[in-house]
Image: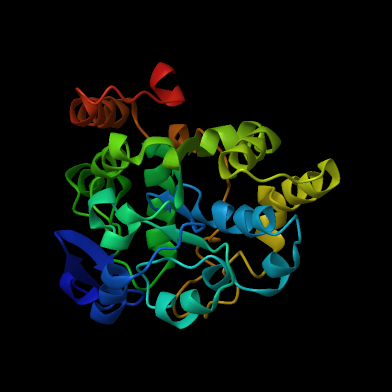
Amino acid sequence: MADSELNLVYHGILLPKVIHSEESLKYLQNFQFKDDDVFAVTYPKSGTTWMQEILPPLLNGGDLSSVETIPNWDRAPWLEETRAPVVLDKLPSPRAIVSHMQYNLMPSSFFKSKAKVIYVARNPKDVIVSSYHFHKMVTFLEDPGTFEEFTDKFLSGKNVFGMWTDHVKSWRNPELGDRILYITYEEMLQDLREVLGRILKFLGRELSAEALDRVVNHGTFKNMKTNKMSNYSLVPDDFMDNKKSHFLRKGVAGDWKNHFSPELDAKFTAVIQEEMKGSNIRFPWDEE
């Protein structure tokens, strides 16, 4: 199927039609943020499902019932997707909301509110590997072609949700002040408990050591992978073919080394560095 049949264009960014519509994007534009909303923002394949797994129990005293009984797209819905108008206004406060949208595409109510933002970044080389396998398993995205072809699209922003560098830079906006916390996927892999402690402090909330242990244990990749409310096994095979690849595939850092040739690595690194020049944004993987 042609790219134009699969995606719609919103402010120059491609969005999959199967989960976005003119109506859902109108809902995004008119959405009213509450001051106690907690908003997790990611570029796709950077830890969104993880945030949907840990934020609800962090916000309700460590209670795991929601992550064990409610699909992640209903417990912490995407603001821009078609499911949002159905469930978001019914969620009790404080609401956990996720998004893949850039900062400049937020509704006007966001800028007037005190809603807290958690931005999760991931090494773009691992992002593209995860995205490549995701494209191969789903029917509502364009066939990725070879890994090299897919990389060229990614670097030129001709993929869903646009340029990774644009996304990252848009959310490093000084106007957000202390409303935003920056974490990385790699930090969560390295020490999830420490990161959850940071999130709790940022949100001005506390959990008992026992409750925090519960959330940390439940939030491991291994446990998420077996949780049918989080692993997308509830989605019909004609949308996601789990025989081709699991939605939650590996959950590791550094898998890109199994996919990139030295030449592709050099090309990818050069383009990303050029795009990020002058931004003064540094990530742990930049030092590797």
Q: Is residue 242 visible?
A: no
- Residue drawn at point x = 69 percent, y = 57 percent: 57
Q: Residue at x 57, y 62 (%)?
A: 94
Tell me if 113 is positioned left or right of 207 in this view. Answer: left
- Visible in this render: residue 128? yes
In-image side of 246 versus 31 (left or right) = right
Which of these two is toward me, 70 or 1?
A: 70
Residue 137 vs 257, above or below: the answer is below
Classify residue 119 by image quadrant. top left
Looking at the image, which is closer to me, 212 or 144?
212
Image side of residue 205 versus residue 141, left or right: right
Query: Horizontally, is 193 left or right of 51 in the view?
Result: right
Q: Nearer the viewer, residue 64 or 181?
A: 181
Q: Position of residue 190 (x, y in %)?
A: 63, 31
Look at the image and name its color scheme.
rainbow
Query: What x and y, as percent, mark residue 1?
Result: 23, 75
Give the percent coordinates (x, y) of residue 103: 28, 49
Q: Residue at x 68, y 65 (%)?
A: 67
- Quadrant where the C terminus sits is top left
In which quadrant of the rendered view does residue 26 lie?
A: bottom left
45 is higher (above) or lower (below) than 273: below
Q: How many marks?
A: 0
Provide residue 202's location: percent of width, then percent of height.
Answer: 56, 39
At x 25%, y 73%, the residue is 6
